[in-house]
Image (cartoon, helix red, strand yellow):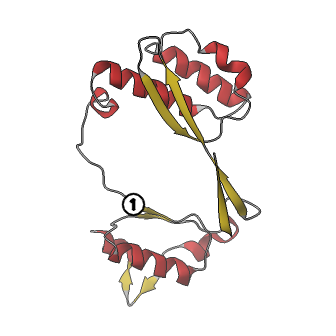
Amino acid sequence: MRLPLDPPFAAAWDPLPRRHFDATLVRVETDEGITGFGSGDTMDGFDPFADLFIGRDPRQIASHVRVIETLGFHAGRYWPLEAALWDIIGKACGQPVSALFGGARASLPAYASFGAATSPGERADSVLAAYEAGFRAVKIRIDRADVAAGRPGRRSGTPLRSWWT
């Protein structure tokens, strides 16, 4: 899937602005009629490896994960397939995957994530807007070439970290 980005997005980790965002939606069907879904990075170049999974029991997740990790080292990032396999396991058990992992929490707090490298003033404004929108945590990007400039400063004499209590 490709989402055009207009205006282009200047991601802090990319050398050039992104003009589109690519992602993959994975659908895995079992012979028992269970369909698992996963999404994430593109799975470009996966076709030659599909036979490593087709016809295999999706419940053998440890084996599948080892193969996906090996492929990730040598070929591409195929973790959306792992998400689809976990979805199948959860559906087969009649439980959300989070419950299979212990269900320690019924909900998780969301945080605001900013991907563009912006000036300290723009970052502070974005953080304040996120706080006013109800977020209590943020992830920001800073320039690796000037880490000192990316450190939290003070605005109105209040340290940023105290706003998230």
Task: Classify residue 137 by image quadrant.
Answer: bottom left
Query: Which residue is under mark 1?
Result: 111
Residue 62's spot in the image, x, y percent?
A: 48, 17
Q: In this view of the protein, which residue sits in the foreground, 44 or 139?
A: 44
Work out whether 98 lies above or below 108. above
**What residue lies at 65% left-to-right and 63% top-to-bottom?**
5
**What residue lies at 66% left-to-right and 68% top-to-bottom?**
6
Question: For the residue carrying disc 1, how many other residues have a C-alpha within 10 Å: few (<14), some (14-19), or many (20+)?
Answer: some
Disc 1 residue type? Answer: Tyr
**What residue lies at 69% left-to-right and 19% top-to-bottom?**
49
Residue 36's spot in the image, x, y percent?
A: 45, 27
Q: Is residue 11 visible?
A: no
Work out whether 104 lies above or below 100. below
Q: Is residue 19 visible?
A: yes
Q: Quadrant of the C terminus?
A: bottom left
Q: In this view of the protein, which residue sits in the foreground, 11 or 151?
A: 11
Residue 60's spot in the image, x, y percent?
A: 46, 12
Q: In the displayed image of the protein, which residue is found farthest to the front? A: 33
**What residue lies at 57% left-to-right and 63% top-to-bottom?**
115
Residue 20's spot in the image, x, y percent?
A: 69, 57
Q: How many marks?
A: 1
The answer to whether 73 appears left or right of 157 in the picture is right
Work out whether 116 lies above or below 107. below
The answer to whether 98 appears left or right of 24 in the picture is left
Label 1 sits on a secondary structure element that is loop
